[in-house]
Image (tube, rainbow, N blue to C red):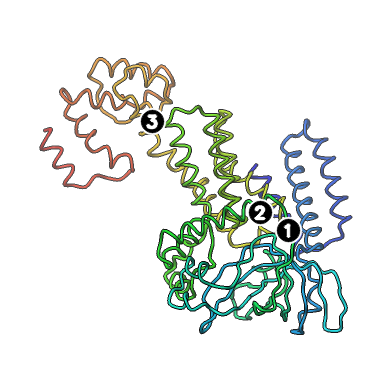
């Protein structure tokens, strides 16, 4: 699975920078598939390489077809010249009241247009996303309190929710990026959220229309998200509530500029971003609790996956959370099927699924950082542990059992060197040696070392120095002198 994912990633990179007609990719991919099937039984290694080449070509074709059809409707660009427009639209993301200028309140809301009427009276159906800023006066009761609860309770300005239909008069403009090297890609950020233009208006120019536009599932998600935000702001101070909103459900609308800059300068801004860590913590707590309640593996796994999916659905963050949810689901399902839970396979399967869904994810920093970090842990960290301290950990299990070592591999059969004096150690050592010829190079498991303390000071000294031996480092001189003084 890992090799297939790497081939698919290389194909996406080649397709992004080396344009070729789509027919070329199709013919080459079909030829490689035919040859891979032919050599599958004759030369399996050669056929396997041809299959990877076919995956490479399929990925190149995928990215080129995906780039030819952009996901953002830019038909509204012709109207984004700051002329006065009357727009009929529906809300796609809930609005939030925030303090703006002097004695003013601002509500940011994402809408999708239905039709646009220009100044000359022409009306055209346009379906594009707009990030709209609605400004209104602040009520006298809310002047001294900028909290979420006070603004929503005392402000005369209505809050628009998902599915509401509105008609407003506004001037539109296109988003732009600063040309500084490494600057934030604001246009790409809005494009990922299907936003093609920016606009602003006064609350007096906004009219709520009857009816609902949208899906019921998205409406339920919006209500859950809104309910969590309201509860958080009821329990905490506005500054702390804004941080909790960002860390728990990914709502960054209430973080002020100064707080955002402070976290960026300190290098801890990732704390305010919902990522795979949140999903991992949730999955661990839920699964551990269900298993402590004596729930069987199957229902515990299904409930854990359900909680993770519900959390990813509620946060509305997007790809990072769904990546972690997919990896967690694959890991738990392989555990449920009693298969070897290779982290590299779970990582590769999650990456491949996301790249098939959206190949452009390969070029996003979030995707690259997530999978490179986990790949380093899975491909380097875990093998090192399996070849070092994991051996001693398995040897320490049931160290007082005589028969346990007979079922261990030779390297695990010996946790410490030393003369086998105890009868149980002699029996264990014999069973280890009978298991493999290499077992003769090792002497006794930890049970022998602990059982021989009364008759072999050398075993006691080596047992006390066990922490340094497991890490393949020499014990400090003071520890060696201390153990020699205790067991001369």
Depth check: 327 or 479 in front? 327
Residue at image coords 32%, 17% = 402
Residues at badges 1 and 2 in contact (C-beta under 8 Å)? yes
Q: Which residue is mark 1?
A: 212
Q: In the depicted view, which residue is nearer to us: 100 or 266?
A: 100
Q: Earlier in the sequence, mark 1 or mark 3?
A: 1
Find disc 3 in the rendering and name its residue.
394
Q: Which residue is mark 2?
A: 219
Mark closer to the chain start, 1 or 2:
1
Q: CA distance from mark 3 to mark 2?
A: 51 Å
55 relative to 339, above or below:
below
- Label 1 or label 2, whichever lies nearer to me, is 1
Which quarter of the figure has residue 406? top left
Cβ atoms at labels 1 and 3 below 8 Å apart: no
Residue 178 vertical placement versus 372 (above, below) = below
Relative image position of residue 176 (x, y in whole percent): 67, 78
Q: Residues within 10 Å of mark 2 (few under 14, many from 20)?
A: some
Q: Please report the residue visible at 75 percent of the width from the left and 52 percent of the height from the top.
A: 59
Please, is residue 69 above or below residue 198 in the view? Answer: above
Give percent across and percent down for residue 2: 63, 44
Question: What secondary structure is found at the residue carrying circle 2?
Answer: helix
Which element is circle 1 on? strand
User: What x and y, as percent, mark residue 248?
Assistant: 49, 56
- Between label 3 and label 2, give the one nearer the viewer: 2
């Amino acid at each position: 699975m890992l090799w297939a994912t790497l081939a698919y990633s290389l194909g996406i990179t080649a397709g992004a920078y080396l344009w070729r007609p789509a027919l070329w990719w199709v013919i080459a991919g079909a030829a490689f598939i035919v040859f891979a099937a032919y050599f599958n039984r004759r030369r399996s290694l050669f056929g396997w390489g041809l299959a990877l080449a076919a995956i490479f070509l399929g990925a190149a074709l995928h990215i080129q077809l995906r780039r030819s059809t952009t996901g953002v409707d830019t038909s509204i660009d012709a109207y984004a010249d700051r002329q006065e427009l009357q727009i009929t639209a529906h809300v796609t993301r809930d609005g939030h009241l925030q303090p703006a200028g002097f004695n003013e309140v601002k509500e940011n809301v994402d809408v999708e247009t239905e039709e646009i009427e220009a100044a000359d009276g022409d009306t055209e159906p346009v379906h594009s996303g707009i990030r709209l800023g609605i400004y209104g006066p602040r009520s006298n009761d809310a002047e001294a309190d900028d909290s979420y609860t006070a603004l929503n309770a005392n402000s005369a300005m209505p809050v628009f929710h998902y599915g509401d239909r509105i008609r407003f008069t506004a001037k539109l403009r296109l988003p732009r990026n600063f040309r500084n090297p490494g600057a934030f890609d604001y246009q790409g950020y809005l494009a990922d959220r299907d936003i093609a233009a920016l606009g602003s208006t006064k609350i007096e120019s906004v009219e709520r229309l009857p009816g609902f536009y949208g899906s019921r599932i998205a409406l339920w998600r919006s209500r859950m998200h809104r309910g969590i935000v309201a509860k958080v702001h009821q329990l905490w101070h506005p500054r702390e509530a804004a941080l909790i909103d960002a860390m728990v459900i990914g709502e960054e609308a209430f973080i002020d500029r100064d707080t955002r800059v402070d976290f960026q300068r300190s290098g801890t801004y990732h704390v305010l971003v919902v990522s795979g860590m949140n999903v991992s913590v949730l999955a661990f707590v839920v699964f551990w609790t269900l298993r402590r309640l004596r729930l069987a593996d199957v229902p515990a796994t299904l409930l854990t996956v359900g909680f993770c999916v519900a959390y990813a659905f509620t946060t509305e963050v997007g790809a990072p959370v769904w990546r972690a949810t997919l990896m967690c689901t694959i890991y738990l399902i392989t555990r449920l099927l009693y298969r070897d839970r290779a982290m590299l396979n779970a990582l590769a399967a999650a990456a491949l699924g996301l790249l098939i869904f959206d190949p452009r994810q390969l070029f996003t920093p979030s995707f690259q950082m997530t999978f490179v970090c986990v790949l380093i842990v899975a491909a380097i960290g875990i093998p090192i542990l399996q070849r070092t301290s994991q051996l001693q950990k398995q040897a320490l299990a049931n160290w007082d059992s005589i028969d346990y070592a007979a079922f261990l591999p030779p390297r695990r059969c010996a946790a410490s060197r030393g003369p086998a004096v105890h009868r149980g150690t002699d029996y264990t050592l014999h069973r280890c040696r009978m298991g493999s010829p290499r077992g003769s190079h090792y002497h006794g498991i930890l049970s022998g070392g602990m059982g021989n303390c009364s008759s072999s000071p050398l075993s006691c000294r080596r047992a006390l120095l066990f922490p340094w031996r497991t890490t393949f480092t020499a014990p400090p001189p003071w520890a060696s002198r201390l153990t020699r003084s205790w067991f001369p």
